Amino acid sequence: MDRSAVEESVLAGLENELDWLGETYRQLHAHPELSFQEHATSEMVAEALGRFGFAVQHIGGTGVVGVLANGSGPVAMARADMDALPVTEATGLPYASQSDGVMHACGHDVHVTALLGAAKLMGQARSAWRGTFIALFQPAEEAGGGARAMVGDGLADKVPRPGVVLGQHVMPLPAGTLATAAGPVLSAADSIKVTVHGVGSHGSMPHMSVDPVVLAASIVLKLQTIVSRETKPGEFAVVTVGALNAGTKSNIIPDRATLLLNIRSYDDAVRRRVLAAIERIVRGECAAAGSPREPDFEYYDQFPLTSNYPGTTETVTQAFAAHFGPRSVQGAQRQTASEDFSAVPDAFGAPYTYWFLGGSDPAAYSAAVAAGTVDRDIPANHSPFFAPVPDPTLSVGVRALVVAALAFLDAG
Ligand code: ZN
Ligand code: ZN
C-alpha cells in the first residue's frame, strides 16, 4: 500500500466515531481537573486505551501511557496533556464546566479527545500498518512539572524508545488549519525567586542598616541591562520582575527583600547567558551594598525550549500538505508561551515535532482578520471565553495525529 492508501484505511473509521468524539470532548470539557488532580480523566483514558487494545501503564501519578505493539517496525509516540486551569468559565456553552473556578481554558480537552480518537483508529486498523504506536497522556502541563514527573517515574525504561515524538496544541487559528515550523516554536521559561539580605533597623537610623529596599530597587534597574546591553540585537530574551516585596511599615527598614523574576528565551545559549547574568548582577549589587549574606536563588516553574527537529518536521509538514492540502498547513509563528512537551522526547533522546491546531470559528476569524481585531475578538488560550469549535477541530486533530504517526510507521 502507498502512504495515502494506508492513511485512507486507518481514517476510514473516523466517520463512525464523530459522535463518540464529540461526546468525549463535551464530557471532558464539563469536568475539568487541575494539574496533578486529573484522576477521573486519567481513569477514563486508561480504560479507553485498554478497550482499544493498548497495553496500559500509569506513570508519574496521573500520567497514562498506552503501547500498541503491532509487529516489528518503527516506534512513534504521540503526547497529549490533560490538565485544566483555575479559570471561571464564561463561554455560556451547554457543555461548560460544572466545576466552580476550574476550566479547560487551554484546550487540553481537545488534545485528550484527539489522541484517544487517533488511538482508537490505529487500534481498529492494525492490518494497515506495522510498528509500535504509543499514546502518552501527561498530567500538569500548566504547572510545569507533569512531563518531568513521568520522566522521573522511569518513563524511558518503561516504554520502547520512540523514533519520533509528536505533539499538538489547539490555538486561536482558523479551525481546519495546522501550523508548524522547524526550530523554536515555543519559548523556554524560567521563574526565579531571589531573596537578598540586608540588616534591619529603625527607619530613623539608616546608618545602622543595610537597606534591602534600596538594594532591590538597584537590582531591578540593573537587570534591565541584560536585554538592552548584553543580548545581541536580533536575539530574543525577556526578563521581567513580576513581584518585588519588602518591609511592613514606613519606619522599619526590613532585613530582606524578595524578587520574582520571569525569563523567556528561544535559544539555550541565550538562556544560560541570561540566567548567569541575573546571578552575577544580583551578587554584584549585594556586594556593593554590603549585604551580610549571599543572596538565595530558587528556580521554579521551569519550561524547556520547544524547538522542532528539522528532519521530522519536514516529514510531518509534507504528510500534512499531502493529506490536508498545502493551503491548510501554515508556517508557525514563534510563540512566547511555553510547554513542557520536549521533556518527553528529551528523556529518550528522540527527535520531535510539535504543531498548532486551529480551533477558532473560521468565519469569525476571517472577519476579525479583515477588521484587524484578531487579538481583541478571537479568544485565546487561558481566556474564560476560550471555546474551540468542536467541528472540525476534533476530527482535524485526530487526522493530524494519525497522518503524522503513519509518516514514520511502516505500511502493513
Ligand atoms: Zn495553557
Ligand atoms: Zn496548553
Image (cartoon, rainbow, N blue to C red):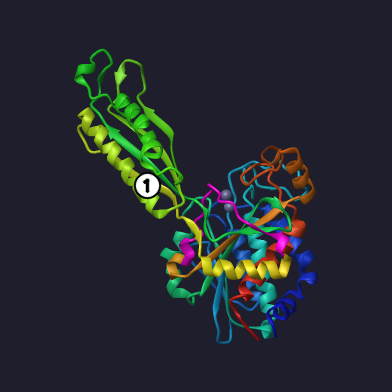
Quadrant where the image shows the N terminus: bottom right
In the image, residue 310 above or below residue 260: below
Part of the protein shown in magenta: 326-345
**In this image, 211 relative to 168: left or right?**
left
Q: Which residue is mark 1?
A: 299
Residue 326 or residue 76, whichever sits in front: 326
Residue 233 visible to an observer of this rendering: yes
Magenta stretch encompasses residue 92:
no
- Residue 360, image x and y in percent? 72, 50
Q: Residue at x 37, y 40 (%)?
A: 193
The answer to which image quadrant residue 402 occupies is bottom right
Q: Amino acid at mark 1?
A: Tyr
Residue 48 visible to an observer of this rendering: no
Quadrant where the image shows the C terminus: bottom right
- Residue 210, image x and y in percent? 23, 25
**Furthest residue toward top:** 204
Q: Residue at x 68, y 86 (%)?
A: 127
Residue 179 or residue 29, whichever sits in front: 179
In the image, residue 406 above or below residue 99: below
- Residue 334, image x and y in percent? 55, 51
